[in-house]
Image (cartoon, grey):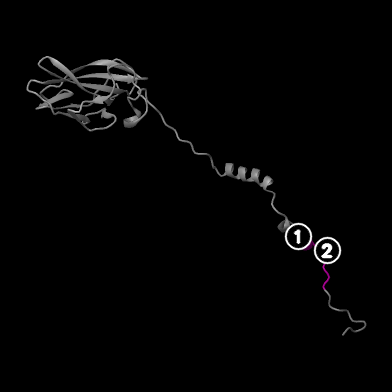
Amino acid sequence: MKLEGTIQPEIVLNKSFPYYFASKWFSTISCVKPNRGALIPVVFLGLLLSGCNPTTSTGGSSQGGSGASGGLTCDGVTTGRFELFVDPRLTVSPSVKIAPLTKSGEKIEFTDSKFEDGTTYTYDLAYVNKGQAFAQGGSIFFDSEGSPGFDQGNGKFQIEGPLSQSTADGGPYAGILTVIATVNGQSTTLANICVALAKE
């Protein structure tokens, strides 16, 4: 019941009061849909400030080409008589795309299944640069240790690193090792093998 002359309790919000404007401002913000186009530059700027950069991979290749064993390869060699192959009679260990001969202890072992008494084994070496093979000379597989090529007898022989080219600067280079068997004056090329040479 309303009494005459009595002031009724009534809350009146003074619109000039700061909280009123603050509440109106926040309600307006909450009702506005974000402008995606306007947000894109802001997000991009945030990525830059947070250090988000595209990742990049780097790689290098040596003068012999890129591939296994430190980035060297004999792929693409166009020089005649240096095509890679292994005669079925010859077993090579390790059987890899490119065998390392860059330091002491690295070796390639050979077994000739058609060994005959009196057979001698020799090797020639060429280094590879930009698709070309350059001959470096070679040596015999000796029947005593102390040289790179060692003939163990009965068709078993090996070559041990470090083996390097001698006529070119820089490197490291890939090389092609040619293995030759000679018996009764007849020579047979048994293999052209890709190797990694020690840096000069």
Q: Quadrant of residue 33?
A: bottom right
Badge 1 vs badge 2, beta-carbon distance below 8 Å: no
**Residue plotted at (83% across, 66% down):** 14
- Is residue 127 placed above or below 39 in the rendered structure? above
Reading the image, the residue beneath label 2 is 15
Type of amino acid under label 2 = Lys
Q: Which residues are magenta?
A: 11-23
Which residue, as the protein is rendered here, is positioned at the far right? 4
Type of amino acid under label 1 = Ala
Name the one closer to the observer, 102 or 137: 137
* Quadrant of the drawing holding the N terminus: bottom right
- Is residue 11 placed above or below 67 in the rendered structure? below
* Quadrant of the drawing holding the C terminus: top left
Which residue, as the protein is rendered here, is positioned at the far left? 117
Mark 1 secondary-structure assignment: helix
**First along the sequence among labels 1 and 2:** 2
Q: Quadrant of residue 95?
A: top left
- Percent across and percent down for residue 49 are 58, 43
Say few, some or many: other residues with alpha carbon within 10 Å of mark 2 (under 14 / 14 to 19 / 20 or more).
few
